């Protein structure tokens, strides 16, 4: 059974980058069996369709406007996931990802297990900034929720002893940018 852990979002728009930051931390902290793929999906929209269609299990990490208090974390499972990915659009990638799920469903390739771990953003309109402090403070919690969700699916995560290579060049650029900003 192939499991896909997918972080989506735009790291250039404040809290909108939560999903890609969370999946990067998951990748840094844990090693998974070969049948588990951890992917920084960024803002790829429909280009993510092959990954979703090839997955038996899909766990999405993202910033979602649930209408909750800022920095609230919520886990959604099953049929409710597509509703939240399109109910209140906070970025272009979410419209695209809802379309990815609809396309996979029409093709008969929707993953049998589908979960979303999302955080309510504080701000999305601050181009060039990192996550707000309240949202950044929820990263570790979301990583642990992801590990627990995967464990419920029978996926065992092994803590890493040494950091791996970053998931994507964009993550390396973010790390360099934040190092310069800090000082």
Image: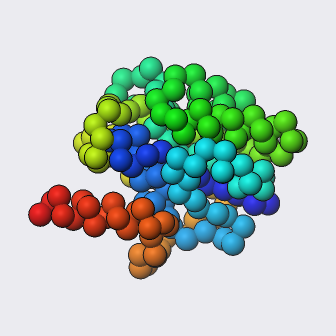
Image: 1 above or below 59 = below
**Image quarter for residue 35?**
bottom right
The residue at the far left in this view is: 183
Q: Which residue is pictured at 43% across the width and 46% down the height? A: 10
- Seen from the viewer's position, the closer of residues 101 and 35 is 101
Query: Residue 98's image quarter?
Result: top right
- Count the marks: how many? 0
Q: Quadrant of the C terminus?
A: bottom left
Apparent side of residue 66 relative to residue 173 in the rendered image (left or right):
right
Outermost residue toward the right in this view: 108
Q: Is residue 123 in view?
A: yes
Q: Position of residue 70 (x, y in %)?
A: 34, 28
Instruction: Give the image quarter of residue 36.
Output: bottom right
Q: Residue at x 39, y 49 (%)?
A: 11
From the image, which quarter does the N terminus lie in? Answer: bottom right
Residue 138 x/y as whole percent: 36, 44
Residue closest to the eye, 166 or 31: 166
Q: Is residue 28 visible?
A: no
Left or right: 170 with respect to 96? left
- Residue at the image point whose x is 74% and y is 54% from the top: 50
Q: Residue at x 52, y 35 (%)?
A: 92
Scheme of image coloration: rainbow
Q: Nearer the viewer, residue 47 or 61?
A: 47
| Percent x, y of residue 84 | 58, 27
Asked whether, in this view, residue 59 is left or right of residue 40, the answer is right
Left or right of residue 86: residue 28? left
Instruction: Provide residue 67's location: percent of width, then percent of height.
Output: 44, 20
């Amino acid at each position: 059974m192939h499991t896909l852990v997918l972080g989506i979002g735009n790291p250039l728009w404040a809290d909108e980058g939560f999903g890609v930051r969370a999946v990067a931390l998951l990748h840094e902290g844990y090693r998974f069996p070969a049948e588990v793929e951890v992917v920084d999906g960024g803002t790829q929209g429909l280009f993510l369709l092959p990954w979703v269609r090839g997955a038996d299990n899909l766990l999405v990490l993202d910033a979602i406007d649930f209408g909750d208090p800022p920095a609230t974390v919520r886990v959604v499972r099953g049929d409710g996931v597509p509703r939240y990915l399109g109910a209140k659009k906070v970025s272009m990638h979410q419209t695209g990802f809802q379309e990815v799920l609809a396309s996979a469903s029409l093709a008969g390739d929707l993953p049998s297990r589908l979960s979303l771990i999302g955080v309510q953003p504080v701000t999305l309109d601050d181009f060039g900034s990192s996550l707000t402090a309240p949202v950044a403070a929820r990263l570790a919690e979301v990583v642990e929720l992801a590990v627990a969700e995967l464990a419920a699916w029978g996926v065992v995560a092994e803590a890493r002893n040494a950091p791996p290579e970053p998931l994507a060049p964009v993550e390396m650029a973010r790390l360099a940018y934040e190092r310069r900003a800090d000082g």
